[in-house]
Image (cartoon, helix red, strand yellow):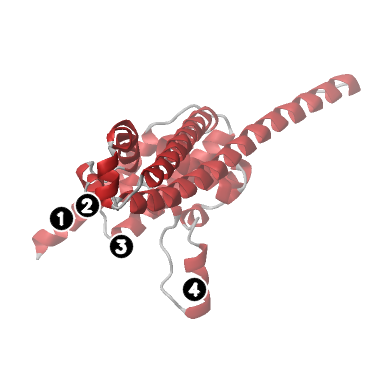
Amino acid sequence: MNLNKKDFIKQTEKAIEEYSKENINEQSLLKALANFDLYQKQYNTFFEYFKDWYSLQNSKKYDELGRDNYKYVKYLMDNELETLNKDTYLSSGLQKDDLTQIKNLSNTLLQMYSITSKLENFITKKSKELYPNLTNILGPVLTARFLNQAHSLKRMASLPASTLQLFGAENAMFKHLKFGKPSPKYGLLYLHPIMSGLNPKQKGKLARYMADRIALASRMDLAKKPLHKELLEDINNKKKIILQQKENKRRWY
């Protein structure tokens, strides 16, 4: 097809605009992930100090609430920190000023939890919109982590499955190459819920298969292909086969 100069310039400008929009969306997702990790880390640090401080007042409540951090802070805010009387403060060794500071810290924790939840919702929404096939396999947050490791979807789609399999295992690979330690079999994939119930050898087998499907999904998303749910179904079936092999080996013995 022959294009005149005017049409060529128009199509080039359109392609640049589309690429720029995609790049902004991708970078926005990665910035959200960075902030999500930062807030989550700070929340966990603050919570440990908060729990240790309030345990001087009541050391059993955390276990009674199922060791759920958010429920623990919310319960204390809505109940004990509002209703404790002065005698309780004195008998526990905590003064009213102590409980006031603890209450201020609990407010901060609830705010941080709210921000973290909103960031996670944003990551979920963006991942599903931009990378449906990757998100179907990895989940939204892990998809963002893989993209952050690869720096872009375009680069990720160009990488072999063996490289994707070891994303996040750079330190272990360095020790393998430098000191002869065992070679890693998986990195970020260790965080995937499907890995539960498998021993290290089985995880390595499944990671190899998952990396192959992840490589395929990244290329589908780069080409704007629709969602292919069978990719995740293949992975689930592969896990069943791996577990079945273990069961057959037991029967043999």
| Residue named by callout 1 | 247
Classify mark 3: helix, strand or loop. helix
Q: Position of residue 31 (x, y in %)?
A: 60, 40
What residue lies at 19% left-to-right and 51% top-to-bottom?
244
Badge number at residue 201: 3
Classify mark 1: helix, strand or loop. helix
What residue lies at 37% left-to-right and 47% top-to-bottom?
192
Q: Amino acid at mark 4?
A: Lys
Q: Position of residue 111 (x, y in %)?
A: 47, 35
Gap between marks 2 and 1 measured at Cα? 6 Å
> From what the image shows, is residue 11 above or below residue 242?
above
Residue 58 visible here: no
What residue lies at 12% left-to-right and 61% top-to-bottom?
250
| Residue named by callout 2 | 243
Q: Amino acid at mark 2?
A: Leu
Residues at discs 2 and 1 in contact (Cβ within 8 Å) = yes
Gap between marks 3 and 1 measured at Cα? 14 Å
Residue 88: quadrant of the picture: top left
Q: Position of residue 63 (x, y in %)?
A: 22, 47
Left or right of 25 in this view: 126: left
Gap between marks 2 and 3 measured at Cα? 11 Å
Residues at discs 3 and 1 in contact (Cβ within 8 Å) = no
| Residue named by callout 4 | 175
* Nearer to me, 130 or 235: 130
Gap between marks 1 and 4 measured at Cα? 34 Å
Classify mark 2: helix, strand or loop. helix
Residues at discs 4 and 2 in contact (Cβ within 8 Å) = no
Classify mark 4: helix, strand or loop. helix
